[in-house]
Amino acid sequence: MLVFNTNTDLIGYLKSNSTTLTSIGFVPTMGALHQGHLSLMQKSLSENEITVVSIFVNPTQFNNPEDLAKYPRTLEDDIHKITILDPNIIVFAPTIDNIYNGNTKSDLFDFDDLENQMEGKFRPGHFNGVGTIVKRLFEIVNPTVAYFGEKDFQQLQIIKKLVAKYNLKVTIKGCPILREPNNLAMSSRNALLSFQEKQEAAILYKTLITTKVKFEKESALEITKWVQKSFEKNPNFKLDYFQIADEKTLVPCTRKSKAKKYRAFIAVYVNNIRLIDTIPLN
Ligand code: PAF
């Protein structure tokens, strides 16, 4: 399997094959790969001539240094998983210096207010970091299609906005959330949970699925109060936010409109490990 550690090597390789290449599928990741990532790679393999996977823990999208320090890093194991899936996948695993060239800072973006909701509010600067790395990776890989999981639904909307604003020639595809047997959304951070915490974290999806039922009759405000109250009673979890929002603008729902699509979003700390999940409501 080909593993490139510098952008010049990867660009050189892709350029030398560019006359015959019809499509490049791209799966950006921060490693600690799970079945959700592998499903994105499978989709890319089925739709493109070649697939590139990046593995890079991007420091500029972490607002909390502790979160960055403890983020799981399992490069060897990740490469092994990719080889088993398909040894033709090309891996790009650059160093921080290779990407940021001695200046590990985010560029500033305006994503038409999408960046100021939820994750943006609770993780200041997060989406400038995401925008910076994704734009740089797109410049290096020059993909035809890029694949992102819907668990990070706000990120997905922001990347679509990035592509539209900068007129980037890449199609963005959102792919469904994969879940553990107890319905916990698959996430690299799950590797940091104990067995018991993982079992208990099923509460995120239970909350979302109950929200979906309640949303048929109750207002977004009533449901939000119910969620906040139920988490107050549960000392093992700290609710960061729960929000029912318009899927397109991500603005909180104050009055339901039949013309709009809504989603519920939740972010919860379990023993300092931050988990997020989302569900479409109508
Ligand atoms: O979703 C992720 O894993 C990251 O935010 C991404 C898109 C790879 C950028 O670092």
Image (tube, rainbow, N blue to C red):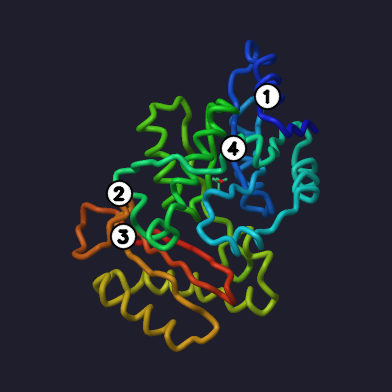
Three-letter amino acid code at the position of disc 2 = Asp
Callout 2: few (<14), some (14-19), or many (20+) C-alpha neighbours within 10 Å?
A: few
The residue identified by callout 4 is 100
Mark in the foreground, 4 or 2: 4
Q: Is mark 3 within 8 Å of ligand 1?
A: no
Residue 45: % across, % down? 65, 34
Residue 180: % across, % down? 62, 65
Mark in the foreground, 1 or 2: 1
SS of the residue at dot 3?
strand
- Name the residue rendered at 53%, 66% in the picture: 275
Residue 47: % across, % down? 59, 31
- Which residue occupies the foreground of this view, 149 or 241? 241
Mark in the foreground, 3 or 2: 2
Decide if residue 274 is on the left or right side of residue 98. left
Decide if residue 179 is on the left or right side of residue 94. left
Q: Is mark 4 within 8 Å of ligand 1?
A: no
What label sits on residue 8 in the rendered view?
1
What label sits on residue 113 in the rendered view?
2
Mark in the foreground, 1 or 4: 4
Three-letter amino acid code at the position of disc 4 = Tyr
Mark in the foreground, 3 or 1: 1
Three-letter amino acid code at the position of disc 1 = Thr
SS of the residue at dot 1?
helix
Q: Is the C-beta separation of discs 4 and 2 under 8 Å?
A: no
Q: Is mark 1 within 8 Å of ligand 1?
A: no
Q: Is the C-beta separation of discs 3 and 1 under 8 Å?
A: no
Query: Which badge, 1 or 4, comes first in the chain's sequence?
Result: 1
The residue identified by callout 3 is 245
Callout 3: few (<14), some (14-19), or many (20+) C-alpha neighbours within 10 Å?
A: many
SS of the residue at dot 2?
loop
Q: Quadrant of residue 103?
A: top right
